[in-house]
Image: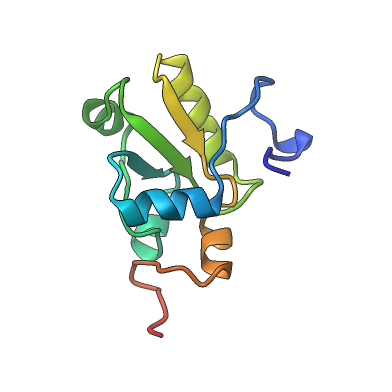
Amino acid sequence: MEQPRSSAALGSEPIRTIGREELRAKLDRGDDFKLIMALNRWAFDAKHIPGSVHFDTPEELYAAVRPEDEIVVYCSNMDCLSSVALYRDLVRRGYRSVRRYSGGLLDWEDAGLPLEGEFVAVR
C-alpha cells in the first residue's frame, strides 16, 4: 500500500513513490537529488534522514529547487499529509521528477537506518 488512505487523500491523481531500499541506494551512491522533509523546523531539527533539507517558507523552497531537479519528499509516515501536499504543489508548479517516500521517517527508523537530529538516540 503505497498511497495514503483515501480519507487522507489530497487530490485524486496517483502519486509517484519511491521505496526505502531505492532511496537508501540513491543516498549510498551519492546521487544528485533533493531529499526534502515536509514537516516543520522543530520536527526536522529533532530527527531527519541524513542528506535531507528543510525549508521554512515556500519562497525558500522554490528559490533553492529547480523544476528540472530530481526531488523526493517525505514526512512522518504513509498517512502524513505534509509530503502529499508538497508533492502536489511541486507537480502543479511544473516540477517534472518528483516522488514521495511514503513510509517516511517512521519506516526509515523502524528499519534501523541512520538518522540525524537532536533527538536521535546514540547507538
Colour treatment of the image? rainbow
Can residue 41 be seen?
no
Is 65 rendered above or below residue 2?
above
Q: Quadrant of residue 11?
A: top right
Q: Quadrant of the C terminus?
A: bottom left
Q: Residue furthest right?
A: 6
Where residue 84 appears, x then y in whole percent? 56, 34
Q: Image point 60% across, 29% down: which residue?
A: 15
Q: Image point 70% across, 37% down: which residue?
A: 8
In front of the other: 72 or 43: 72
Can residue 14 be seen?
yes
Where residue 68 appears, x then y in whole percent? 31, 21
**Badge count:** 0
Q: Residue furthest bottom?
A: 123
Where residue 94 appears, x then y in whole percent? 40, 14
Q: Image point 30% across, 41% down: which residue?
A: 55
Q: Residue furthest left?
A: 63
Instruction: Specify whether 101 is left or right of 96.
Output: right
Q: Quadrant of the N terminus?
A: top right
Q: In which quarter of the image is residue 56?
A: top left
Q: Quadrant of residue 16?
A: top right
In front of the other: 38 or 113: 113
Q: Image point 38% across, 43% down: which residue?
A: 36
